Amino acid sequence: MIEICRDHSRNVKRWESGEMALRWCAAGMVEAEKQFRRVNGHLHLKALRSALDHHAANTVTPPSYTAEKEVAA
């Protein structure tokens, strides 16, 4: 993607502002997007996210704030 962005903006000679550079970079990214491939199993990502959220809710304990209370006292 970076190489395609660089090639896309290679002939620009007068950069007016940082905003213009961002526009050219975005245009290069849109051009690079045409060559991207999908992640294998992309249809299952929603189910994976919900399973990870469920696992984290049941196994991860919230941090204890006793250390902060002792420092403040």
Image (cartoon, grey):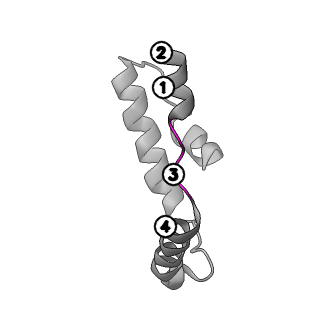
Question: Which residue lies under the disc numbered 1?
Answer: 69
Nearer to us in this view, 16 or 40 = 40
User: Of callouts 4 and 3, which one flags the residue occurring earlier in the amino acid sequence?
Assistant: 4
Does 62 lie within the magenta span?
Answer: yes
User: Of callouts 4 and 1, which one flags the residue occurring earlier in the amino acid sequence?
Assistant: 4
Residue beneath the point at 49% across and 72% down: 49
User: Of callouts 1 and 3, which one flags the residue occurring earlier in the amino acid sequence?
Assistant: 3
Question: Which residue lies under the disc numbered 4?
Answer: 57
Q: Secondary structure at mark 1?
A: helix
Magenta-tinted stretch: 61-65
Q: Which mark is residue 33?
A: none
Question: Which residue lies under the disc numbered 2?
Answer: 73
Q: Which mark is residue 62?
A: 3
> For the residue marked with disc 3, what is the amino acid?
Pro
Asked if 14 appears above or below 50 in the picture, the reply is above
Does 71 lie within the magenta span?
Answer: no
Real-space Cα separation, disc 2 to disc 3, in angstroms: 22 Å
Q: Secondary structure at mark 3?
A: loop
> For the residue marked with disc 2, what is the amino acid?
Ala
Q: Position of residue 3 (x, y in %)?
A: 65, 44
Real-space Cα separation, disc 2 to disc 1, in angstroms: 6 Å
Residue beneath the point at 37% across and 36% down: 23
Dot 1, how many residues are within 10 Å of its Cα: few (below 14), some (14-19), or many (20+)?
A: few
